[in-house]
């Protein structure tokens, strides 16, 4: 990650030093243009968030000034106070965290078990069952929320944390991804272990599972992102503000404050910050995981 | 049914937290033989006031406790319906005029008439038109807790800048129109007025003031000439640029424009007084008065009521609570909390005094000539027709007459379906 | 819930079947069922049973406070007759079309980032990925503010270039594109990462050989990068299509009920939500859901058929 520190590449590019002079200069101007285009793109990607933060710190009167000011006249933190009094933010963040953790843990456990069986074990009807499980991939879960809601209601789980993650703990995509990883392992590993007298679960748990760590990490990252961002399902099952995750909470802030943008920007900033912080610290894992999930296609 | 139970127990066995949560839910009665009532409401701003009333109630009835169940407005009605279906609805909950008749017609509310007669609940201390909103087929199902009227809010600083007199009780629509023209300043993006497409604050009051109606004897008033004249008064302001078009007001609402001093005059509810008061600029130079007179002087009155779920298994305790809520003590506490106008006559002084900078008594004065919020059994069905059909005319595209006529026809069709079902 | 590599399912089935898995172990005859049981139970409760129920619900009508009656194919008739359904379907296809624009954009950026010796690659990559990590609800709010007709930054910037002020998200003729643009903005980073990984996997000597033949960068892009990236591109386009067909979050947060453009931006899933949870028309909503499932399955099938024509497996 040493190269993250430099954004402008005006200096000669090292590896091309062997080429003739003319070509080197061409590469330089070319890379300058590339940097220009890429930086412009990066600005488009990131500036909305800068503007969001600046707006959150302005007063309502200031954000409706024409033309707009760039920096706040005086740094006004009251929008953040309003958000914290309007919404039980601490509960909502906890709910989001628990929902994300529950869903991720559930998928890692259930999917890895099933994926292992589908990849490395033999039993009657295996391929048929695998096909059946994969069919879940074809049905968008957003269209199953009506009966899913009824089921959660029958369990008496409306407005509870388990309601947020229960259906999402079971994933066809996760099973598929992990099965691919298990398939790639050499069979000799298991045979050696079996000769040593290890049972199926022992082999799975202590030998095979550690070997597919990159796949598990990829699944964890992708599931966590999906869970944190989920909106439709929580909007339906958890209507009590204290049981809502942050995504649904933000929509109720919009209902209360209409188009009071400083408050909305403050709220959305607080809501997206936790995942962004995790991303900043685990950036490489995020990128690798997404790339991994794509390359398995 | 058997299959579902099987699945349920299967899953319950598979995951321990489910079991724990299941057992948590059971039983409304807490320890010590106390009955716990659940009270459903949607407005977080009123929670503190309600909690004080509940404390006073619990003191009087030590064997009953009340737990507030807050559901945000956006999901309140959906949640209520599904929880009625699943048998988990709150024992007592807030009701509004839009939804009342549907609930009463489906027998999911407890009839209160007998209780009222027996316990001599002071129904006559509440505005009669509000009480009537919550009667269905001659039976009373709900008791009003508060009421809301619509007033004309204005920004004194913007009036001073334009050098015109503040609105007062003598104002007519002509005065409103002239002032709106003077106050509009395109360079600063200031508008004189906001013809926002909002049925309760703007559309209905304009239709009533023009001498029209929304619903009469089961027929739509949108095709009525006077109603259309009222709507045209509004769209006219948009066409002349004295009000932002509706497209602009979904991006920045009338209320927020007024808060940020970009709108000189807006219609808004008495219940918003507290939020207006919290904006320093408006506390300093905001004002409020009665709605200007069109053909008639009027406003829209609406109030919420407390109702009891017919499915509740604690109806006796629930009635005690609703009875208490309709009484003087509860009204006094509610008035002092300053959020809404209590509907109990003579308790509004505390509310008026809570914001001395605003002349809030206009809201009370308007009660006399107010028109109740129109509703039928399936109110939501025909209300949902309004915004899509009127949207273009309120966005400066013209054609309000045709749009209103179409709306009238479609609303009549919906009303006919309602009668037939 | 993502529907990610539906593609890989098909591919691997062909590639992997006869190898290690099947032959390797005899120990798991019975144990295999225990391993898949927890997931199977979850699927049964939360997916298979609801699928059956959705199908059943689609032939019934719900009372507002419980109970439902059999209404035969009425709901399907309503769905097919209702103009808002066709409008929502049209909107959804527009979202799908706009959403796909993220792919060429991501490929171009990926190709630029692939320039030999370019510095700051991982910083760029990290920045481009930020919108994808951000809560969609927050993204919608931020863009609503940027798009704001009176006080928004976008109009201000466009004003420098002489473009007139415009109410982007409430004008029926621009709203759907305004939302679509946000979709592209927030997903480009995701596809960028996938494409960069795909490009990295292309053997470097292909490029060197082409360079010796005198092929310029554009030529190399079209004759090497693009064809060899086609399996990844196919995978991405399937995801992109399925995701766009399910669009809900952004529209829900960016459009209010009073927005004059509401009908012109509503997606099928949005309409489903409105029917099922706002208008108490669960039966019709179930019918709509069922038809959308068929549509997605059909389109996915179509993409698989078409892939033979353009996807290049090395």
Image: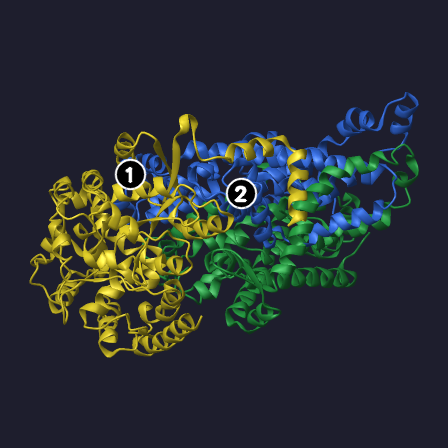
Residue at x 39% of width, y 30% of height: B34
The circle drawn on residue B50 is: 1
Q: Circle 2 sits on which residue?
A: A229
Q: Is residue C270 above or below residue A249?
A: below
Provide residue A244's location: percent of width, then percent of height: 47, 40
Q: CA distance from mark 1 to mark 2?
A: 34 Å
* Label 2 crowd bin: few (<14), some (14–19), many (20+), radius 10 Å: many
Residue at x 62% of width, y 51% of height: A141
Q: Is residue B227 left or right of residue C289?
A: left
Secondary structure of the residue carrying numbered label 2? helix
- Rendered green, the chain in question is C
* Label 1 crowd bin: few (<14), some (14–19), many (20+), radius 10 Å: some
User: On the rendered image, what quadrant is the C terminus of chain B found in?
Assistant: bottom left
Which is nearer the eye, B175 or C304? B175
Tags 1 and 2 in contact by the CB under 8 Å rule?
A: no
- Which chain does the numbered disc 2 sit on? A
Provide residue A5's location: percent of width, then percent of height: 55, 31
Secondary structure of the residue carrying numbered label 1? helix
Which is nearer the eye, C210 or B381? B381
Which is nearer the eye, B376 or A25? B376
Q: Is residue C45 above or below residue B213?
A: above
- Which chain does the numbered disc 1 sit on? B
Q: Are marks 1 and 2 on the same chain?
A: no
Q: Is residue B45 left or right of residue C34?
A: left
Q: Which color has been applied to chain A in this rendered view?
A: blue
Q: Which color has been applied to chain B in this rendered view?
A: yellow
Q: In front: mark 1 or mark 2?
A: 1
């Amino acid at each position: 990650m040493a190269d993250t520190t430099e954004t402008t590449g005006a200096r000669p590019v090292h590896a091309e030093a062997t080429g003739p002079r003319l070509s080197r200069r061409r590469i330089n101007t070319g890379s300058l243009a590339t940097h220009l285009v890429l930086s412009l793109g990066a600005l488009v990607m990131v500036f909305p968030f800068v503007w969001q933060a600046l707006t959150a710190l302005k007063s309502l009167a200031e954000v409706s000034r024409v033309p707009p000011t760039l920096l706040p006249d005086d740094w006004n933190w009251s929008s953040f106070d309003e958000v914290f009094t309007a919404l039980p933010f601490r509960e909502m963040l906890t709910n989001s965290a628990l929902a994300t953790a529950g869903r991720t843990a559930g998928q890692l456990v259930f999917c890895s078990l099933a994926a292992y069986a589908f990849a490395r074990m033999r039993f009657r009807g295996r391929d048929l069952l695998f096909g059946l499980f994969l069919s879940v991939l074809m049905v968008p879960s957003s269209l199953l929320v009506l009966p899913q809601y009824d089921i959660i209601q029958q369990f008496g789980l409306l407005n509870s944390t388990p309601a947020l993650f229960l259906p999402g703990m079971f994933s066809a995509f996760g099973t598929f991804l992990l099965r691919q990883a298990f398939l790639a392992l050499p069979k000799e590993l298991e045979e050696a272990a079996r000769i040593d007298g290890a049972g199926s679960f022992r082999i799975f748990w202590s030998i095979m599972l550690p070997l597919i760590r990159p796949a598990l990490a990829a699944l964890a990252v992708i599931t966590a992102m999906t869970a944190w961002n989920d909106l439709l399902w929580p909007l339906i099952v958890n209507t009590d503000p204290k049981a809502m995750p942050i995504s649904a909470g933000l929509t109720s802030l919009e209902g209360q404050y209409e188009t009071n943008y400083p408050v909305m920007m403050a709220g959305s900033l607080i809501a997206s910050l936790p995942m962004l912080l995790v991303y900043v610290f685990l950036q490489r894992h995020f990128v690798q995981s997404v790339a991994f999930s794509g390359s398995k296609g | 049914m058997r299959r579902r139970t099987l699945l349920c127990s299967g899953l319950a066995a598979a995951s321990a937290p489910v079991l724990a949560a299941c057992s948590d839910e059971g039983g409304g009665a807490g320890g010590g033989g106390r009955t716990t009532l659940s009270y459903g409401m949607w407005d977080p701003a009123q929670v503190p006031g309600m909690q004080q009333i509940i404390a006073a109630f619990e003191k009087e009835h030590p064997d009953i406790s009340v737990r507030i169940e807050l559901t945000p407005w956006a999901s309140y009605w959906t949640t209520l319906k599904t929880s009625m279906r699943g048998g988990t609805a709150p024992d007592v909950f807030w009701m509004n005029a839009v939804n009342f008749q549907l609930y009463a017609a489906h027998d999911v509310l407890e009839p209160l008439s007998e209780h009222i007669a027996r316990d001599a609940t002071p129904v006559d201390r509440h505005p009669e038109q509000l009480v009537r909103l919550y009667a269905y087929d001659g039976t009373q199902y709900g008791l009003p807790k508060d009421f809301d009227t619509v007033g004309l809010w204005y920004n004194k600083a913007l009036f001073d800048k334009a050098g015109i007199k503040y609105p007062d009780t003598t104002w007519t629509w002509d005065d409103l129109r002239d002032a709106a023209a003077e106050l509009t300043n395109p360079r600063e993006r200031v508008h004189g007025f906001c013809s926002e497409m909002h049925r309760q604050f703007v559309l209905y009051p304009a239709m009533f003031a023009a001498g029209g109606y929304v619903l009469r004897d089961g027929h739509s008033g949108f095709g009525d000439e006077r109603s259309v004249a009222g709507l045209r008064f509004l769209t006219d302001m948009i066409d002349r640029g004295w009000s932002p078009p509706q497209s602009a007001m979904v991006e920045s609402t009338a209320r927020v424009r007024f808060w940020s001093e970009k709108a000189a005059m807006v219609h808004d509810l008495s219940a918003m007084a507290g939020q207006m008061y919290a904006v320093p600029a408006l506390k300093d130079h905001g004002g409020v008065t009665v709605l200007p007179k069109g053909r008639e002087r009027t406003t829209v009155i609406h109030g919420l009521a407390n109702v009891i779920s017919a499915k509740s298994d604690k109806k006796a305790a629930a009635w005690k609570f609703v009875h208490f809520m309709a009484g003087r003590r509860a009204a006094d506490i509610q008035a002092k909390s300053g959020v809404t106008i209590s509907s109990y006559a003579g308790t509004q002084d505390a509310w008026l005094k809570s914001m001395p900078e605003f002349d809030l008594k206009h809201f009370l004065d308007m009660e006399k000539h107010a028109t109740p919020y129109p509703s039928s059994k399936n109110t939501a069905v025909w209300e949902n027709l309004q915004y899509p059909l009127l949207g273009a005319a309120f966005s400066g595209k013209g054609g309000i007459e045709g749009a209103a006529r179409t709306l009238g026809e479609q609303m009549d069709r919906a009303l006919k379906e309602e009668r037939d079902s | 819930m993502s529907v990610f590599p539906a593609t890989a399912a098909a591919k691997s089935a062909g590639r992997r079947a006869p190898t290690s898995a099947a032959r390797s172990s005899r120990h798991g005859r019975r144990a295999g069922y225990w391993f898949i049981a927890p997931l199977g139970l979850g699927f049964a409760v939360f997916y298979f049973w609801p699928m059956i129920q959705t199908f059943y619900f689609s032939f019934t009508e719900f009372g507002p406070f419980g109970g439902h009656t059999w209404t035969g194919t009425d709901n399907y008739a309503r769905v097919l007759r209702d103009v808002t359904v066709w409008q929502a379907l049209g909107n959804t296809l527009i979202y799908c079309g706009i959403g796909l624009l993220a792919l060429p954009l991501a490929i171009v950026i990926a190709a630029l980032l692939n320039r030999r010796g370019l510095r700051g690659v991982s910083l760029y990559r990290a920045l481009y990925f930020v919108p994808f990590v951000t809560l969609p609800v927050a993204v919608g709010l931020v863009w609503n503010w940027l798009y704001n007709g009176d006080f928004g930054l976008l109009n201000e910037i466009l004003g420098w270039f002489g473009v007139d002020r415009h109410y982007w998200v409430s004008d029926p003729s621009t709203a759907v594109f305004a939302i679509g643009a946000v979709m592209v903005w927030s997903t480009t980073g995701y596809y960028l990462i996938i494409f960069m990984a795909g490009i990295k996997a292309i053997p470097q000597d292909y490029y060197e050989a082409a360079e010796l033949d005198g092929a310029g960068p554009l030529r190399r892009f079209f004759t090497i990068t693009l064809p060899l990236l086609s399996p990844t591109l196919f995978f991405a386009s399937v995801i992109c299509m399925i995701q766009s067909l399910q669009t809900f979050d952004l529209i829900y947060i960016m459009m209010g009920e009073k927005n004059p453009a509401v009908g012109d931006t509503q997606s099928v899933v949005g309409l489903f939500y409105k029917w099922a949870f706002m208008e108490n028309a669960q039966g019709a909503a179930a019918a709509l859901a069922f038809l959308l499932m068929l549509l997605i399955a059909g389109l996915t099938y179509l993409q698989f058929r078409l892939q033979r024509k353009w996807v290049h497996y090395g």
